[in-house]
Image: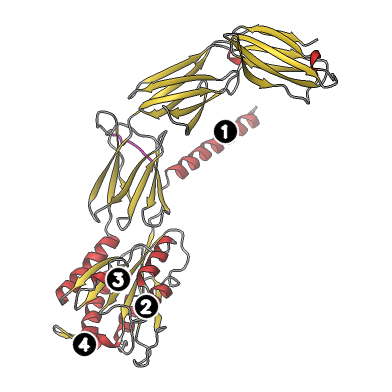
Amino acid sequence: MKTNSIKYSLIGLFLLLAVFSFSQGINEKKPKPLTRILFVFDGSQSMYGIWQSDIKINIARKLLSNLLDSLSKVENLELALRVYGHQNIYPPQVCTDTKLEVPFGKNNSSQIKYRLSLITPKGTTPIAYALEQAGNDFTPCDNCRNIIVLITDGIEECGGDPCAVSEELQKNGLILKPFIIGIGRDFSDAFNCVGNYFDASSEKQFSKSLDIIINKALNATTTQVNLLDEYGKPTETNVNMTFYDNFSGIIKYNFIHTLNNKGLPDTLMIDPLLTYDIVVHTIPPVKADSIKLTSGKHTIIPVNAPQGYLNLKIGSYINIVKDLQCIIRKAGEVETINVQNFRQKEKYLTGIYDIEVLCLPRIYIDSVTIKQSHTTTIEIPMPGIAVIKKTTYGYGSLYLENNNKLEWIYNFRDNNPYQETLILQPGIYRVVFRSRYSDKSFFTIEKSFSVQSGKSINVKLF
């Protein structure tokens, strides 16, 4: 007896630990993504030009170094430095002149500052090629935000297409939309298609641009999605929302919408650097396109999603019918939006729907109205059972007799020579059958019969 008591205690303890571990797994939050910022720095010959208090290269080095000092203790951040136009003297023009000077790593600000101090402007400006090579600097990572900050005092000089390269990198999901700082004059016409352009017309503007970019890249940004009912109140919930990158079409997030303990939509933390297309997976789904967030601010996204319920019922004797389904369509449309089982209640957007019940014969119910927070119930009669008994293989069909016309319902299976059991809605039916071995149409057999709810009937074709 004591042994059994110990055994049951151990089983209980095991189950308790299993439930605890499972609940811990459910409640475990996803880790924050690692932010990786690659500075693509202009080391071309023109960076020797005089600009305000010094030459451009010195000013850019100093301001970027100051920024690096402020980032040295930021958690969950890795930095890297790629330079172009600094290895080969111009002329001649070398359009492959770019190098990853400092790869991604933690706490490498001092290393980047050191490499910056050694740069001597020499060559041309192969921006497209540098960006293309930058794509290889980001090693594969499942939970990373990859950001390029391009610092340049000129535009593409090697015939490349920075816009096309940036677009390809973004569409492949390799990087977020790049940031570009143009030194000395406005290059917005050349770089607006590449990414988010900042015009650094002065040293002060350069420093401010760097600060804005880092704030956008690192500041936490919150949002909430208000699923609105017909009264404009955010009461709808418990449905999945998919956030797509508007530019690349890549899935970025999935969230099951939740109301918190105050009855308000839950707050989400998402990347502010993307423009989103949101699909709320109601039936049918609703969409919100081109949603932009402001870094560091809370954004409320309203989506109209008023819903009610459709309940499908069938008469008594439910064991006769299993897995009966119906097709749900928007009224007057042919597209199937759902296939719903009977004895199941499902949520739909408010509106008018057409229903096709997949029974024998089909039942069509048009203009079913789904109202806000209301359950619309559709009930069909309990079917009956017809047992079609045969003595041989043959050819035949079942028809519904309706106003002296025959409506085809079902073709008999030639591989079953003895009987077929059909679940049929109440009504009057006719069987037309001929044996495979009869060589004259004259031997066709016809039999009419009536099906009643919840009852069986034997139909003998002999």
> In the picture shown, does residue 422 fall above or below 57?
above
Q: Nearer the viewer, mark 4 or mark 2?
A: 4
- SS label for mark 4: loop
Q: How far across and how far down the image is residue 379, in percent?
A: 48, 14
Give the CA distance from mark 2 to mark 1. Answer: 63 Å
Instruction: Kindly identify which residue carries mark 2.
Output: 82
Q: Are marks 4 and 3 in contact (CB under 8 Å)?
A: no
Alpha carbon of mark 4 to alpha carbon of mark 3: how far? 30 Å
Crowd band around label 4 with a 10 angstrom C-alpha radius: few (<14), some (14–19), many (20+) = few
**The N terminus lies in which quarter of the figure?**
top right
Q: Label 3, on which residue?
A: 72
Q: Are marks 4 and 2 in contact (CB under 8 Å)?
A: no
Dot placed on the residue nearer the N-terminal end, 3 or 1: 1
Q: Earlier in the sequence, mark 4 or mark 2?
A: 4
Residue 197 position, x and y percent, is: 25, 67
**N-terminal of the two: label 3 or label 2?**
3
Task: Classify 10 Å Cα crowding around label 1: few (below 14), some (14-19), many (20 and above).
Answer: few
Residue tagged by mark 4?
49
For label 3, the crowd category at 10 Å Cα-Cα, with few meaning under 14, some 14 to 19 and many 20 or more, is: some
Q: CA distance from mark 1 to mark 4?
A: 81 Å
The colour scheme used to paint the residues is: secondary structure
**Quarter-wise, where is residue 71 in the image?**
bottom left
Q: Is residue 430 left or right of residue 367?
A: right
Mark 2 is on which residue type?
Arg
Name the foreground residue: 94 vs 221.
94
Secondary structure beneath label 2: strand
Give above or below for 129 relative to 388: below
Reply above or below: 272 against 313.
below
Lower position in the chain sequence, tag 1 or tag 4: 1
Instruction: Where is residue 373? Give x, y as percent.
Output: 34, 24
Q: Residue 9's mark?
A: 1
Q: Which residues are magenta?
A: 256-261
